[in-house]
Amino acid sequence: MREEVYNFWHMCDSKFPLNVAMSGISYCDKNYRIERHGQNLFSFEYIIDGSGVLEINSQTVYPQKNDVYILTRDSDHVYYSSEDHPWTKIWIVFYGEFAEFLFQRYLPADTYIVKDCSILSYMNEIINISSASNKSYSDLIDEVSVMLLKIVLHLKNHLEHKVLSAAERIKLCLDVNIENKLDMNDVCMQLGYSKNHMIKLFRETYGITPYAYFRKHKIELAKHYLLNTHLTVNEISVKLNFADQHYFSSTFSDIVGIPPSQYRKNKKN
C-alpha cells in the first residue's frame, strides 16, 4: 500500500475554530483496515476508484467509485477495502467548533455516505493547500475552512435535490429487474446499504420487505403472461428467471392460492 500523507497534529491549537489533523491520498491494498472508537474527529473521504466497506454506529455502507463517506465525531467505526478492487481515495481529518457547526447546520444526522457525488476538485484543492511548503498553519486553516464549507454545501445540495428517496431507489432497482434473477445482497452493494438497513427503509415506506415485494410483483407479472400470452407455464418460469417450473408453481400457489395452470384455466373460463 502507498499513501501521501500531510500530518498537522503537532500544529493543532484549541484557539482555532477548526483544526486539520491530516490529509492525504491512499492507494489501498486488500489489507487496508482502520478502526476507531469515540474519537473527537470528523473526516471526508472521497473514493476515486475501487470499493470497500464502512461499518459505523450500527450501520454498514459500501462506498465505491465517486461516493463520499463521512466519519463523524465520537463514532465507532471500522472501514476496509475490498480484496479484488481496493480503494484509491482522497481524504481529510479535522475537528473543532467550525466542524461541529457545519455538520449540525447543513447535514442530516446519521449521514455516513453520499452516493455518486464528486467532490474531487475540492479535495484536490485541499491537498494542494496541505502540500504548500511556504504556508503557515493559520493560513492553511483559513483556506481549508473555505473548502470544507464548499464540500458541505455541495453534499447538502446533492442530498436535497436527488429525485428519489432511498426507499424509492430500492423500489426502482427491484422494478427494473423484475424479470431477472436478483440477489438482495447485490441490491445492497449497488445502492450502498446494509441488508438490515435496506429492509428497514423499504418496510417503513411500503409496509413490506424488499424480497416480499419483489416476489409478489414477479407473480403479478406472471399473471399477466398467463392471461395475455400463449407462453407455457415452463416458458413463463424461464422468462421470469425462476430456478425451475416446480419452484415457480410453488411460489405462485403460495401467493395466489392455486397453481398457475389452474389460474389460467379459471380466468379463461
Image (tube, rainbow, N blue to C red):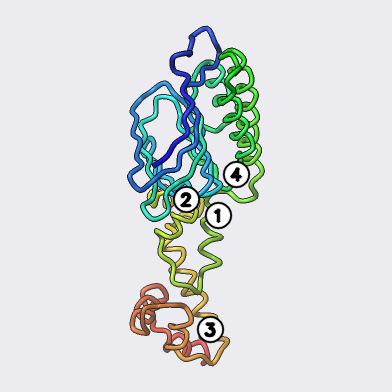
Residue at x-position 47% and y-position 33%: 4
Camera-nearest residue between 27 and 94: 27
Q: Earlier in the sequence, mark 4 or mark 1?
A: 4
Find the distance from the CA under tag 3 to the CA under tag 4.
40 Å
Q: Are marks 2 and 1 in contact (CB under 8 Å)?
A: no
- Mark 4 surroundings within 10 Å by alpha-carbon count, few (fewer than 14), some (14 through 19), many (20 or more): some
Vertical position of residue 123 compared to residue 253: above or below: above
Find the distance from the CA under tag 4 to the CA under tag 1.
16 Å
Q: Nearer the viewer, mark 3 or mark 2?
A: 2
Find the distance from the CA under tag 2 to the CA under tag 1.
22 Å
Return the mark for residue 117: 4
Q: Nearer the viewer, mark 3 or mark 4?
A: 4
Return the mark for residue 169: 1
Q: Are marks 3 and 4 in contact (CB under 8 Å)?
A: no
Find the distance from the CA under tag 2 to the CA under tag 4.
15 Å
Q: Which residue is mark 2?
A: 50
Q: Nearer the viewer, mark 2 or mark 1?
A: 2
**Horizontally, is 29 left or right of 91 in the view?**
left
Return the mark for residue 18: none
Q: Position of residue 234 (x, y in %)?
A: 42, 88
Identify the amino acid type marked 3. Tyr
